Structure formats: structure tokens, C-alpha cells
Image (cartoon, rainbow, N blue to C red):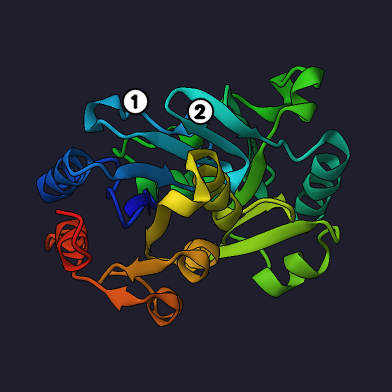
Amino acid sequence: MKTAVFLDLDGTLWEWGVVPDSAREAIRRARANGHKVLTNTGRARSEVPDLTYLGLDGFCFAAGAEVILDGKTIVDEPLGEGRLRAVAGVFDSFELNYSLESGENSWLCINDQAAFERLLDMVGGTPDPIFHAPRLQDMPDEQWGRIHKTFYHGAGPVYEQVVAAMPEDVVLTYLGPGFAEATAASVNKATAMEAVRAYLGADEWCTMACGDSDNDLTMLRAADVSVAMGNGNDNAKAAATWVTTDIHDDGLLNAFAHFGLL
């Protein structure tokens, strides 16, 4: 039986957009053995650089809201205008900075300029397009129905206060102090993984998930086998079948070898 492998981006496949050579080798060798390798990220497609040089088979974007396999879109589930406006209203009420993200574009709302400038200082010099997106006030009205997810970033109230104000059909996933992403309750990294497996033929493929943080927990728990990076947090490690080495210490290559993909 062949394996469909799902890779988180930040902290798993890359760090600040840089993919270790050993990870490239792992992908190349696994695909040469007939396995499929896909990304499975919370980032929207508009915020991910061209990864065709890695030879990946597909991409799961926006925490499962958009899935592309072999060049074909098999999942496209925006938040919906009503839900999105409700979430944006919550973020505004807490004076949070946030991004609205779709496959085509992302848009930025700044409620706290000082917090945003501190964030820019922190990520300055990195190839991250999120914090250089056009402003929300310039977003065409029709885009309200095309946004796949939104996330808040920078200073603000504790996560528990914000999550308590979320609409019931929205999940707010903690990404670290001052960061959380809001997605439709009907999609996540696990539903993306299962959509790919069903498309490929569920009886012929098993799944393997690799991640490092709380927004990877759904796929780590749902996969047939799962790997937490050595640099991952305690929750990811507890949810995983196996813990590999650090991203910069051949983490993916060691994981692929451990599970016989190479």
C-alpha cells in the first residue's frame, strides 16, 4: 500500500521559507518510490511562494479550506460572508490586527498600529507576504464571499477571551501568544487529508502526517501514522505516533526513513 504524506509548512517543511536540503531529498526519494507528498498548511494559497521546484503532488491550503491535487481543485470551501463578518466583528471589538486570506489574495486590517510595527520588527527581512498585504478597506465587496480563513496577530487579549466570543460554527485555533486562526468548523487539516485519500482511492492509500504545533493536531490524530518534529510543541508530540529530530537535523528525512518511504 502506498502512502500519501501531508507536511505542515512552518516548522516542519521550512523555516521562514527555507527548505532544508535533507527535506528536499526526502520528498524526491519518497515520490520516486510511488508515494505522494503534499503540503497541509494553515496558510492560504496567496501567502505561499511557488513550490513547484519541490515536485509536490498537491497542496492543502487554509487549514483544509482549499485542496489542490495533481493540478485539480478538489476542495474549495470559503468561510462565507456571514461567518466572516461575524469573526471580523469579534476581532474589531478586541482591537486586534488580523488578515483575511483567500487563494487569490489576502487583506490586512490594522486596529493597533503600534502592535503591528512591533510585529514587522520581529519578522523583518523574512519572505513572509502576510504582513505586506493590501488593507481591508481596499478589498472589493465580492471578496467577502471568497475568504477561506482569517487570523489575528500581535498584541491583544488572551486567547480564551477571543475564542469565547466566536460564532459557534467557527473554530479558533491557538498558534502561540498573540496569534490564532479562525476557520469554518466543517474544515481542518484532517478533512483535507481525508478528501485527498478519498480522491485517490481510500482502500489503496494510507496517510502520514508531519507537523509541529497545535494547528496540526487534527491531522496528527487522524492519520494512519503521524510524526511530530523534534522542534515541535508538547501537544504535537503527544498526538504523534513518533517524534523525529529537529527540522534542521534531517527531521523529515529521518521520519521518511523510519516509516519505510525511502
Of 180 and 53, the residue lying toward us: 53
The kind of secondary structure element at disc 2 is helix
Residue 177: tell me if it is visible.
Answer: no
Give x and y (percent) for residue 116. 54, 46
How far is disc 1 from disc 2 in space, using C-alphas? 10 Å
Q: Which residue is mark 1?
A: 50
Specify the amino acid type for callout 2: Ser
Query: Quick check: 187 left or right of 178?
Result: right
Specify the amino acid type for callout 1: Asp
Query: Quick check: 262 left or right of 50?
Result: left
Residue 144: tell me if it is visible.
Answer: yes
Q: Which residue is mark 2?
A: 46
Query: Quick check: 150 left or right of 115?
Result: right
The kind of secondary structure element at disc 1 is loop
Of 237 and 136, the residue lying toward us: 237
Numbered mark located on residue 151 in the image: none
Of 46 and 27, the residue lying toward us: 27
Give x and y (percent) for residue 13. 29, 50
Residue 49 higher or lower than 43, as above or below: above
Quadrant of the drawing holding the N terminus:
bottom left
Disc 2 packing (10 Å; few <14; some 14–19; many ≥20): some
Residue at the spot 14% in from the left edge and 44% down from the top edge: 29
Give x and y (percent) for residue 151. 62, 49
Residue at the spot 62% in from the left edge and 51% down from the top edge: 152
* Numbered label tally: 2
Residue at the spot 75% in from the left edge and 71% down from the top edge: 161
